[in-house]
Image (cartoon, helix red, strand yellow):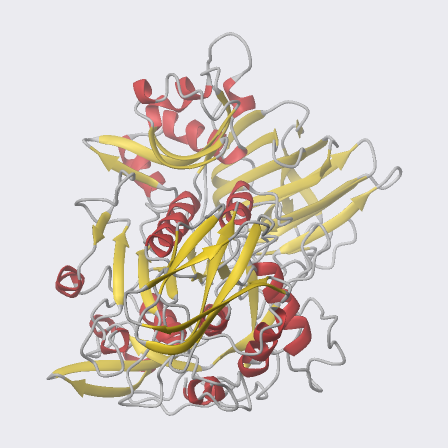
Amino acid sequence: MKKVLLSICLWAFLCHPGMNAEEKMSPSTQNFLRSYESASTIQRAKLKSTYAVTQENSRDIVSAFLHLNDENELEGLAENGVSINARYGTILSVRIPADKLVTVSQLPTVKYIEIGRPVHKRMNTVRSAAFANIDALHAGTGLTQAYTGKDVVVGIIDGGFQYNHINFYNTAGEELRVKRVWDQNATGTPPAGYYYGREYTTASSIVAAKQDMTDCHATHVAGIAAGAYRGNEYYGVAPDADLVFVSYNLYDTSSSNTSITDGIKYIYDYAESVGKPCVINMSLGYHIGPHDGTSTFDRICDELQGEGRLLVGAAGNEAEENLHIKKTLKPGDNTLKTVVDLGSSQNTAIDIWGDPNKTISARVIVYDIAQRQEIYSSAFFSTATSTSQRIANPTGVYGEIYISTATDPNNHKGNITIDVGILPREDTYYIGFEVSATEETTINAWTNTQYTEFSNFGIAELTNGDNNTSIGEIGGTGNRIITVGAYTSCNYIEHKNSTIYNRSYQNVDQLASFSSHGPTTDGRMKPDIAAPGSMLISSFNSSTCSNSRGQYYNMVVEQYNANNTNYYYGSMEGTSMAAPVVTGILATWLQARPTLTPEQVREVFAQSAKTDSYTGNIAGVGNNEWGYGKIDAYNGLVQCLALSGIEEVGAPTRPMVYPNPATESCRVLLPGDDQQVSIALYSLNGAEVYRLYAGDVQAGETVGLDLNGIPPGIYLVRITGEKNHITTKLTVK
């Protein structure tokens, strides 16, 4: 999971009487506007490489979360070119013409605007009992059936798909399992209700499209979660699952976190339309946000998840970087001062957060670490009022720095964003900042560009950074998102074309040195679980590795020919790879228990995760490096079955109960001929509340159920006979 590069921006502007436009905009939105309005045509092209900006009919369009005062009051939005892609109560995912942002902010219905943030990417032995313990599920060892993700939808939001890779067909290599593709960056016919991208809905159109971009990340991730090709040992965890791909552009940043929430809703909506449970994988992330689960993105994800709707995210790969800094400001020690080591970069974004309902202020400094003194200092900017400032060529550096302030409406925390795009005039000059407060408050801040860190360079007046709370926003901070860390299941691989990419210094079973960890700033344990993430072999996109000019050529492990076509497999590592291991496992658990919730998943982790000398004695308790421990697919599935109090739960099939939801009665459609059929209803705590003996039935025959006296709620309908063993869900109103 690589961090997003967000640099430069900020703008102060004229607005209508009443609340200033700045006060209705996030710091990032202010930053973008200040740069956009003052930029030349060439400079605007640079903005498009660092923000989620697209162009339609020669007009610049940005994606954003739009907070409304009243979800039913939309007056003025359409007139100003706002396209609504998805609704989440009073929050809308929208596309807005850049030159209309100020006007839209002044509409009475608009409470707050958050411009979208670009987000970037971040099997052989893995299935064995020594690691994730998946092979026993596929074999059905000690179970009434095998569990392979059948009749479950696995969604992947990523970039670098080879849609027609043999790994995404069924095990016979004959039927494509990819049911839908939404390429959010292509032109064409978008999904119904959305206003961008191209949707592919048939196998022929998906195969014809071939790929979304020349990258491997998504093909590798999807192969881990649900690859099915049995011509080698590198097939995935849920090889019988249906697949839905949402292509997120990893490079030109025309996609953003708003695109991801749109993709999540799109996948869940498809799964609901076919009556199947769903789990979605996001091996993406960045470090802009409060890291406490209150961001707009996390709030939307919490709302979208629920029974049979799970969401998995990568923790991040920043545990070796001091990208975080924290200090509690108190009377007598009420400032935090630090500098940023940009490494080889010239750009970064620094995101600073205080406590709820506390005012904080910050100033930009340029610091000479050789002379141990400041050579430039700006004025202080306070979160008491939203404001923004562009600082051009301050003493000691070439370039621009932008600082903006606001109070976040989701958590009432003061938020200061500093966007940096500079070149120091001397090697000893560093950009930094000082934060102050008049009352006790804890400051947390992150730098958002890979390999940039907070440092004190051994200088007493400066505060050093740390790698705590190094989990990323997107996959690492949500209350209901299942966050995954990585451990080493393999540390040496023979590559076909090179000897690179080996981690012999990492012990097998050891937590991967890069695996980000918590806690969140509100004190929750993250990650939730750890899975194999170094080094994993899975499918590669052929366009990236078929010859020596390909980006992933040196990482190829094997090449296979099927149907007169060459397909490639190679190795990668990261929490990006650990997350789809868990995604695939959750697909098998959903096959067993289609109503599984995120909260129940954590309960299963606590009861079934493996611990050893590396994890320490954390059984049932967990910690901020391993979560509850190492995932155990088989024992976790056994716990899923036990959750319902039903000893055996078969695979879900197409919806058979109607109407659903039901009130006084419903009917059950039997899928085939069977004898001695019984139909029973169970509450989610496993108590039997209704039973009917139907006897011998024929395919297509329906059986009526009398629901009078059944309390409202969600129930499992279990149908058993000599041939059938089926469980589905019924909601009684």
247 sits to left or right of 327: left
Residue at 40% over, 82% down: 722
- The quarter of the displayed image where residue 550 is located: bottom left
- The quarter of the displayed image where residue 105 is located: top left
Outermost left residue: 564
Q: Position of residue 728 (x, y in %)?
A: 45, 64
398 or 316: nearer the viewer: 316
- The quarter of the displayed image where residue 634 is located: bottom right
Q: Position of residue 668 (x, y in %)?
A: 39, 60
Residue at 73% over, 54% down: 523
272 or 560: nearer the viewer: 272
Q: Position of residue 675 (x, y in %)?
A: 38, 79
623 or 493: nearer the viewer: 623
Residue at 45% over, 39% down: 8
Q: Position of residue 510 (x, y in %)?
A: 61, 83
User: Is residue 330 in view?
Assistant: yes
User: Is residue 631 in view?
Assistant: no
568 or 22: nearer the viewer: 568
Q: Is residue 238 above or below residue 34?
A: below
